[in-house]
Image (tube, grey):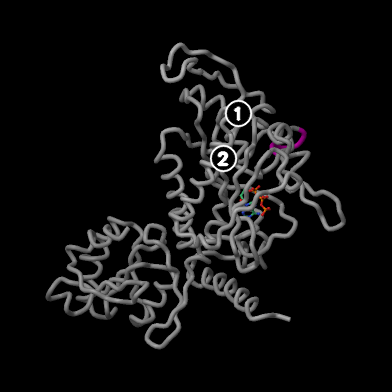
Amino acid sequence: MINSKDTNENDLMDKIVSLCKRRGFVFQGSEIYGGLAGTYDWGHYGVALKNNIKQNWWKKFVDGRRDIYGIDAAILMNRKVWETSGHVAGFVDPMEDGKQFNVMFKTQIGAGDEAVVSYLRPETAQGMFVNFKNIVDAFHPKLPFGTAQIGKAFRNEIAPRDFIFRQREFEQMEIEYFIRANDWEKYFEYWKSEMLEWMEEVGLDMAKVRELEIPKENRAHYSSRTIDFEFDYPFGRKELFGLAYRTDFDLKNHKLEYVDEVPTSEGTGIPIESKVIIPHVIEPTFGVDRAILALLLSAYTEDKQGGEIRSYLKFKPNIAPVICAVSPLLKNKKELVEYANIKVYAPLKEEFGRVAWDDNGNIGKRYRRQDEIGTPFCIVIDFDTLTDNTVTVRDRDTGEQERVKVSDLQNYIKEKI
Ligand code: ATP
């Protein structure tokens, strides 16, 4: 029997998927050829949303700190990386008949007899571990320090499903934070709270986020402690992000070391003792696509306006794909269109970039469309504008409108983001 909760929850996923297609966020991959399971293509607003999420993450965890170094490593890596990391032997999922299936995509590099086997990376982490020495030699960082990377990962998932939740090609944002072995518990707690803070900052519904301690038998081969941050999706409570203590597993296997300079007497900084050690690693990992799905589910809201049900995405202004939409009241009135284009749209577009021009259909329709995109402000140029140089600015959440001077528009928006 389907109870009403199930119906609503299934409805919600259907609504999100169709909104994403209708409004140009996410399309099924290879759709006109019947699709390719586990792949999705991102439209204009989906890309904008994804970029905002990634930039926000990078700003907090790389640009906003002194101890984390960015990396953009190749997706294709020497096969030995995956043998050494344990992925060739152990990155497996059980199939229905009990056999183990390695979920890495195998590929050939080079032609003919010269061809060698490699894999599309199933995680971005290894690209950071194998560059450990390069980072140390180039930047001379002192422990604790980290590396961060955003990039694609590929897994031949046995059962891709639930829209962008489980795909075969997806994107990760990962940090490898190198520490002294004794400090692992302290930094594990520290990164747990940093992760929670970021989730809240971007606007996830924190009432739907749960921590799950993963028991030993379910942890990845490299981890001695893992916490999953789970999210209450309509299809159940499932993993959103993860936090793992990877010990010195990876650096040890890759035979990478670090010369640690330890002050011998507390506080003085001297004399210094040098020791060769293998740093341990705390790894906060974030799936971009799951972040977007959780964000869409957190932001999706329905209410009644003007006696009609409307749906909108209640994104924070700094995350919304469009910060404001500019509309001439009537699209066939030349003076309105010119004013809107030259005096309002052009300068706002130049300042914020994420600005939409919308003159399609009547004003009510435009508001509904921008609500579904999650645009916080709709600016309308009407006949009064031509005489008093003010426009109406409509607030997405309340539907309230106020008149703002054209010359104040940029500051008005800046104050809200
Ligand atoms: P699951 O148990 O759901 O398969 P996992 O534990 O294998 O996930 P990790 O190896 O911890 O996932 O990967 C790190 C992050 O990458 C996850 O927290 C998730 O956000 C994201 N991720 C993993 N697999 C996928 C996938 N198939 N599609 C989209 N995102 C994924």
Residue neighbourhood size for the residue with mark 1, other residues' Cα within 10 Å, grouped as few (<14), some (14–19), many (≥20): some
Q: Is residue 157 left or right of residue 20?
A: right
Tell me what residue is drawn at x 56 percent, y 65 percent.
Answer: 27
Residue 385's mark? none
Of the residues shown, which amino acid type is indicated by label 2? Phe
In the displayed structure, 85 sits above or below 324; it is: above
Residue neighbourhood size for the residue with mark 2, other residues' Cα within 10 Å, grouped as few (<14), some (14–19), many (≥20): many
Q: Is residue 400 left or right of residue 274?
A: left
Where is residue 248 drawn, in percent x and y? Answer: 65, 30
- On the rendered image, what quadrant is the C terminus found in? bottom left
Indicate whether residue 131 is drawn in magenta: no
Cα separation between marks 1 and 2: 12 Å
Closer-to-camera residue (132/234): 234
What residue does disc 1 label?
Answer: 181
In the displayed structure, 413 sits above or below 388; it is: above
Q: Secondary structure at mark 2?
A: helix
Count up the numbered dots.
2
Q: Mark 2 or mark 1, which is nearer the start of the sequence?
A: 1
Asked if disc 1 and disc 2 are in contact, CB closer than 8 Å, the reply is no
Q: Secondary structure at mark 1?
A: helix
Closer-to-camera residue (221/100): 221
Of the residues shown, which amino acid type is indicated by label 1? Ala
Where is residue 392 drawn, in percent x and y? Answer: 24, 74
Q: Is residue 352 left or right of residue 267?
A: left
Where is residue 180 drawn, in percent x and y? Answer: 57, 27
Tell me what residue is drawn at x 33 percent, y 65 percent.
Answer: 324
Where is residue 69 drawn, in percent x and y? Answer: 47, 34
The residue positioned farthest toward the front in the image shown: 266
User: Which contiguous range is marked in magenta?
Assistant: 109-113
Distance from mark 2 CB to nearest ligand 1 atom below 8 Å? no
In the displayed structure, 191 sits above or below 29; it is: above
What residue does disc 2 label?
Answer: 188
